[in-house]
Image (spheres, rainbow, N blue to C red):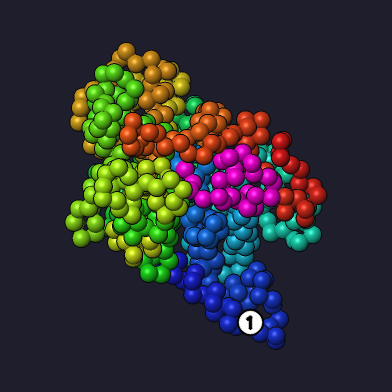
């Protein structure tokens, strides 16, 4: 698959160079016979759709930005800049907000690429089975874009063909329920065509699989809180009906370049060191470790949700939590995800550096919290998860694949669905929550063993917290707080940071506002409505 991405970089360049004033076919019409003449050319357009799947625009046009952008709109992350997503989090965005516009544009650009493949690949002389598989891949990508669009914007323009300029200027919005029904129909249809992960050759690692299609189908039910269908689809994935997946043996190792395509990965976006990279972490890690500045930092609310090693929340008197030593005996995933004062940072050469963030711990360092300073953390914490020790400039230019779906999510879906149906049992607990915690590094029986006295409400809290801490910084929190209808609570207050200085002063961050009558849907971009009068607007915008 990495070879395919390289072909995408090269082949369109040849097309560009071939164009001149004597060309009979304009450059923008890749739909013409002049382009669709070989398998390699068809593959290059499909590869473009893969690269567009999680966004190419945004604050700095970073490839794969969309997944990370979603976290910046949650209670997990505070943004240390006045940018588009800051305005959304503060509740002061309008329909002309740049994030609303470029996300919409990115999705429809990707859909256009998919339609281009689907409408023209039959012209290419190539193996029929391969052709049908490539069509199925394009259909998956297109369905994923429509699902994301309808999740964020509600009713959206929906179509399954290339639109003319005139058609695009008058098309109306299709109801959310109708779009989701279509997405599910597409995913079920292509599941019989796509190979399993194991049926692909190593050279095709990273391609969309039958398991990925069913994983996305499960998400469509999850976001609708359709517990019966969530349980049904996720259990079939767990049972291996759509390919074999399993928990990788190391939580930290999931995000290491030497373990790409591991047993847990269901879908990822390919990157290539020194050719195609991403740089989100350069504004998240400490400056002493080659960070550029600090734009996005973990909140105290996130930190507090990581349980103790005995599985108890820090608010429980029996947890053993010590406010004077707040980072001791915490969930093993905490230190693999978040950098705190006194953190032992392991460099690429295996040497250890102590990260000092508390400004009262002299002498001062570049990583220390300084109010109003854009170069250091605003919350007293930095990010660690996703840091790539093999990246150029120590994490600033990473060729690590971005994982957008993994098997653990299926286990957590199943646990949640079974609990919401009052069907949680020791067997379900052991195959989901216990298995995930064992892999994370928990050993205390109190954290691992089933407790028959758990109520449904208590289990709901455990499962939701487990999702938050296991899947942190993977772009899923926004969709959780929306479907749980808690966004108006967790995003409608003043977030906090660490406690530093005399009297343990808590860092107060900029207040956020969430209007439940408006903010569960994004605004239809004003720029699009200026062009197309048939695009109505969502309530409150």
User: Does residue 129 show up?
Assistant: no
The image quarter in which residue 27 lies = bottom right
Q: Residue at x 52, y 39 (%)?
A: 510
Q: Hey, which quadrant is residue 462 in on the image?
A: top left
Q: Nearer the viewer, residue 167 or 353?
A: 353
Q: Residue at x 28, y 28 (%)?
A: 323
Q: Is residue 321 visible?
A: yes
User: Where residue 11 appears, x then y in whole percent?
Assistant: 51, 75
Q: Position of residue 414 (x, y in %)?
A: 41, 30
The residue that mark 1 highlights is 19
Q: Determine if the magenta segment contains residue 541.
A: no
Instruction: Identify the image quadrant of residue 242.
Output: top left
Closer to the camera in the image, 328 or 444:
328
Rate crowding at label 1 as few (under 14), some (14 to 19) or many (20 or more) other CA atoms within 10 Å.
few
Range covered by the magenta-colored residues = 78-101
- Which residue is more in the foreground, 111 or 377? 377
């Amino acid at each position: 698959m990495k070879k395919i991405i390289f072909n995408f970089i090269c082949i369109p360049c040849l097309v560009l160079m071939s164009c001149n004033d004597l060309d009979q076919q304009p450059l923008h019409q890749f739909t013409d016979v002049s382009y669709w003449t070989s398998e390699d050319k068809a593959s290059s357009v499909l590869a473009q759709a893969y690269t567009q799947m999680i966004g190419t625009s945004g604050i700095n046009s970073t490839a794969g930005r969309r997944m990370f952008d979603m976290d910046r709109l949650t209670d997990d992350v505070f943004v240390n800049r006045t940018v588009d997503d800051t305005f959304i989090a503060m509740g002061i965005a309008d329909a002309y907000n740049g994030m609303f516009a470029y996300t919409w544009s990115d999705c429809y650009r990707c859909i256009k690429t998919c339609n281009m493949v689907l409408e023209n690949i039959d012209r290419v002389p190539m193996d029929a089975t391969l052709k049908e598989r490539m069509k199925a891949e394009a259909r998956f990508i297109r369905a994923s874009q429509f699902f994301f669009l309808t999740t964020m914007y509600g009713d959206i323009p929906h179509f399954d063909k290339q639109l003319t300029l005139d058609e695009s200027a008058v098309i109306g919005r299709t109801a959310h329920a109708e779009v989701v029904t279509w997405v599910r129909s597409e995913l079920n249809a292509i599941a019989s065509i796509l190979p399993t992960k194991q049926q692909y050759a190593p050279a095709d690692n990273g391609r969309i699989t039958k398991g990925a299609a069913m994983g996305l189908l499960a998400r469509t039910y999850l976001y609708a809180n359709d517990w019966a269908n969530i349980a049904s689809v996720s259990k079939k994935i767990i049972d291996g009906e759509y390919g074999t997946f399993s928990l990788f043996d190391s939580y930290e190792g999931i995000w290491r370049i030497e373990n790409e395509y591991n047993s847990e990965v269901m879908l990822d976006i390919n990157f290539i060191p020194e050719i195609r990279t991403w740089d989100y972490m350069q504004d998240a890690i400490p400056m002493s470790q080659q960070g550029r500045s600090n734009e996005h930092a973990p909140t105290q609310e996130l930190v507090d949700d990581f349980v103790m090693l005995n599985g108890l929340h820090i608010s429980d008197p029996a947890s053993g939590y010590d406010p004077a030593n707040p980072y001791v005996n915490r969930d093993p995933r905490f230190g693999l995800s978040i950098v705190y004062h006194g953190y032992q940072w392991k460099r690429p050469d295996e040497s250890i550096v102590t990260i000092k963030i508390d400004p009262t711990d002299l002498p001062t360092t570049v990583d220390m919290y300084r109010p109003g300073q854009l170069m250091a953390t605003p919350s007293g914490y930095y990010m660690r998860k996703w840091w790539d020790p093999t990246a150029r400039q120590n994490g600033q230019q990473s060729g690590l694949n971005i994982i957008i779906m993994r098997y653990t999510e299926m286990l957590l879906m199943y646990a949640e669905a079974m609990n919401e149906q009052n069907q949680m049992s020791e067997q379900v607990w052991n195959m989901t929550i216990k298995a995930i915690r064992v892999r994370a590094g928990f050993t205390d029986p109190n954290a691992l063993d089933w407790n028959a006295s758990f109520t449904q409400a208590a289990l709901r809290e455990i499962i939701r917290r487990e999702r938050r801490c296991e899947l942190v910084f993977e772009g899923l929190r926004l969709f959780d707080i929306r479907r749980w209808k808690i966004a108006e609570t967790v995003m409608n207050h003043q977030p906090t940071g660490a406690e530093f200085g005399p009297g343990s002063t808590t860092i107060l961050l900029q207040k956020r506002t969430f209007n439940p009558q408006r903010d569960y849907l994004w605004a239809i971009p004003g720029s699009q409505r200026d062009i197309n009068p048939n695009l109505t607007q969502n309530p409150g915008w």
